[in-house]
Image: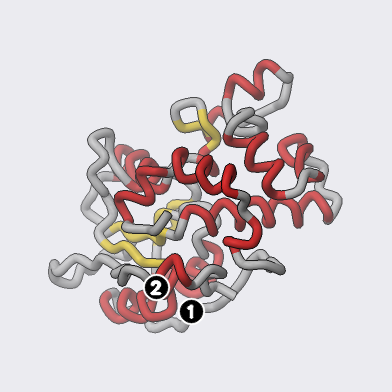
Amino acid sequence: MLALSLARFSERRPLQATFTARGRNPMRPVFIHVSKNAGTSIVSSAGGRIINAGHRTAASWVAEHGSEAPLFSVVRHPYDRVLSEYHYRRRRWEGGEHNPHLTNLSLPFNEWAIATYEGNEYRTRSFFELNGVAYNAHNLINDVAIWFISQVDWLSDSRQQLLVDDLLRFEHLADDWSTLSAKYELNNDLMHVNSSPRQLAAEQQLTPRVRELIYEYYRSDFDRFGYDH
């Protein structure tokens, strides 16, 4: 399911999608695919009616292509996003994928989070180089693997100004997608694909230490997008 696993994160404060009021743009909107934010579902749903920028920052797209075409993306509660990243990687590891970046996926979630965000395991250039792990420099943003940068860094310029015209919320994605689809005349229903099933809600999986660790690491996302801690 694409619904957020921990409902209380979105109940305390209404989280609104952000849509620009400018007139219809005849250009296809560009999708900035933040990892674990329903990007596969959006790309599958929209097909050729959008331009899929892939896993790259909005700043890198604008630097290469300019800002004439409208950009859109999806944001998600950081706790749930980290859980989704873990379960996605764990599913690949359990499926037998031979990838050195999945080596520590035998760890349970909280131990993996501490190893990743405190120990830098399979997250930073320094870890890769010190441990002889192959990596693609193209996937590093300020020496951090792009999958682990904040959503603010993914979607903003160097002054932390958002570059996307339309910002959807994972927590009520179906409604936001309908609004976006109507705005750009995409005329496609939202498909649900590549979701990572989990047995427990986020509050039952995160220890207090890991909650605080994720909060401090992604504090800009909590503050900028109004998510509860």
Q: Which residue is mark 1?
A: 190
Instruction: State which quadrant residue 202 falls in.
Output: bottom right
Quadrant location of the C terminus in the rendered image: bottom left
* Three-letter amino acid code of the residue under disc 1: Leu
Depth check, front residue: 6 or 37? 6
Determine the secondary structure under disc 2: helix
- Which label is found at residue 11? 2
Residue 120 has which mark?
A: none
The structure residue drawn at horizontal position 69% and vertical position 42%, both measured from the top left corner, is 112
Q: Residue 228 in the image: state x and y as whole percent.
A: 39, 58
Q: Position of residue 70 (x, y in %)?
A: 26, 59
- The type of colouring in the image is secondary structure
In the rendered image, the residue lying farthest to the front is 208
Answer few, some or many: residues within 10 Å of disc 2's Cα (few below 14, many 20 plus, some between 14 and 19). Answer: few
**Residue 19 in view (yes/no):** yes
Quarter holding the N terminus? bottom right
